[in-house]
Image (spheres, grey):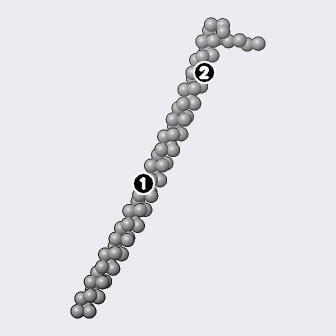
Amino acid sequence: MADNSQKMAEGTQKLADSAGQAEGQAQGKASSMMDKASNAAQSAKDSMNEAGEQVKVKAQDAANAVKNATGMNKTS
């Protein structure tokens, strides 16, 4: 009877070990996925900021071109 109890305890321990390993692997994968998502979001933010700056410069250039064409650009 003690032999059966010992085998059940060993089996339970093996299951607990396997569950612990699976949990550790899942946490590692989740962390890796979160890092990748964070990096992608930062990259998108940087791209949008750069695009915004380019639009701003082009708009300023266009405004200056209109001012120059209409004689409204004051150069003193």
- 74 relative to 45, above or below: above
Question: Where residue 28 sits: x, y (%)?
Answer: 43, 62
**Residue at x 49%, y 48% (from the top left corner):** 39
Where does label 2 land, which residue? 60
How many numbered badges does the structure rendering display?
Answer: 2
Of the image marks 1 and 2, the number of the one nearer the N terminus: 1
Depth check: give the residue in front, 68 or 23.
Answer: 23
Which amino acid is tagged 1? Answer: Met
Where, quadrant-wise, is the N terminus in this rendering? bottom left
Which residue is rendered at x = 54% and y = 26% of the image? 55
Q: Amino acid type of disc 2?
A: Gln
Q: Position of residue 37 (x, y in %)?
A: 45, 49
Is the residue marked by circle 1 packed among few (<14), some (14-19), or many (20+) residues within 10 Å? few
Where does the image place residue 29, in percent across and percent down from the top left?
Answer: 41, 59
**Residue marked by disc 1:** 33
Relative to 37, residue 44 above or below: above
Describe residue 63's horizontal placement relative to residue 27 as left or right. Answer: right
Image disc number at residue 62 = none
Q: Secondary structure at mark 2?
A: helix
- Residues under labels 1 and 2: Cα distance? 41 Å
Image quadrant of residue 49? Answer: top right
